[in-house]
Amino acid sequence: MIAIIDYGMGNLRSVQKAFERIGHSAVVTRDKKVINDAEKIVLPGVGAFPDCMKNLDDLGLIDPIIKGIVSGKPFLGICLGMQLLFTESDEFGIHKGFDLIKGRVIKFPEGLSSNGTKLKIPHMGWNEIRMMKRAPMLENLPEKSFLYFVHSYYVVPEDKEVIATTTDYGVEFVSSIWKDNIFACQFHPEKSQQVGLKILENFGGMK
């Protein structure tokens, strides 16, 4: 069973429906026992980093999530759910994250452009990922896959070995990471049609 963490923010039902569509049982929960008993953990995310950390802390969910990850359960972080894994974020001040992946979360710089066209922030819409290493969740995906993004901040890991994919949006940023049982992505698989469903299917099949 897959536990989708409910902390009062994010498009949880769309993630659950995406898993159901590919035949994997997934429950949206904030019940610590359900999270502890789950085979896999998914942390989606939409919203501001400090608000999310506060909600998780208020609900007592940080400890069971980290324990689940450290125990080796397959973990999928989506968008803000990836950023929370890092040491700290610059969003609305300096805020501590889970510190499971060393590094920071920073905002896109102002004045980004591509081919002479000014780019808007947030980065919103379809963009291409560049494979840096073939994580299990990226198996059987085309080399030039397009996925759906909505974000103003991106992660900067200290250890470049965790980088699975990068994407260009005026700057080349890390669009997904992979370390041991952790896979996390800045894009939204649940909004990325067949390519996104394949990523979720790969995650659902992990042992």
Image (cartoon, rainbow, N blue to C red):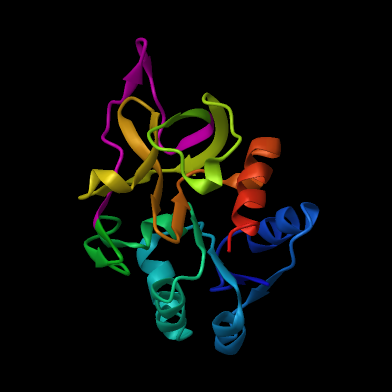
Q: Residue furthest bottom?
A: 33
The span picked out in magenta is 103-126
Q: Position of residue 43 (x, y in %)?
A: 52, 64
Seen at 51% across and 28% down, the residue is 127
Q: Nearer the viewer, residue 85 or 201?
A: 201
What residue is shown at x 63% (from left), y 42% (from top)? 196
| Nearer to the camera, 73 or 63 | 73
In-front residue for pair 124/68: 68
Residue 201 covered by magenta stretch? no
Look at 39% across and 25% down and name the residue there: 119
Residue 176 location (% of width, % of height): 42, 44
Image quarter (top left, top right, bottom left or bottom right) of the C terminus: bottom right
Give the percent coordinates (x, y) of residue 63: 40, 83
Residue 57, percent from left and from top = 40, 81
Vertical relation: 160 (above or below) 207? above
Q: Is residue 72 above or below residue 189?
A: below
- Left or right: residue 55 compared with residue 85: right
Of 20 and 142, nearer the camera is 142
Corner quadrant of residue 11: bottom right
Q: Could you tell me how many numbered marks the image carries?
A: 0
Vertical comparison of 34 with 9: above or below = below
Q: Residue at x 38, y 71 (%)?
A: 53
Q: Is residue 23 left or right of residue 198?
A: right
User: Which quarter of the picture shows residue 165?
Assistant: top left
Residue 33 lies left or right of residue 185; in this view the side is: right
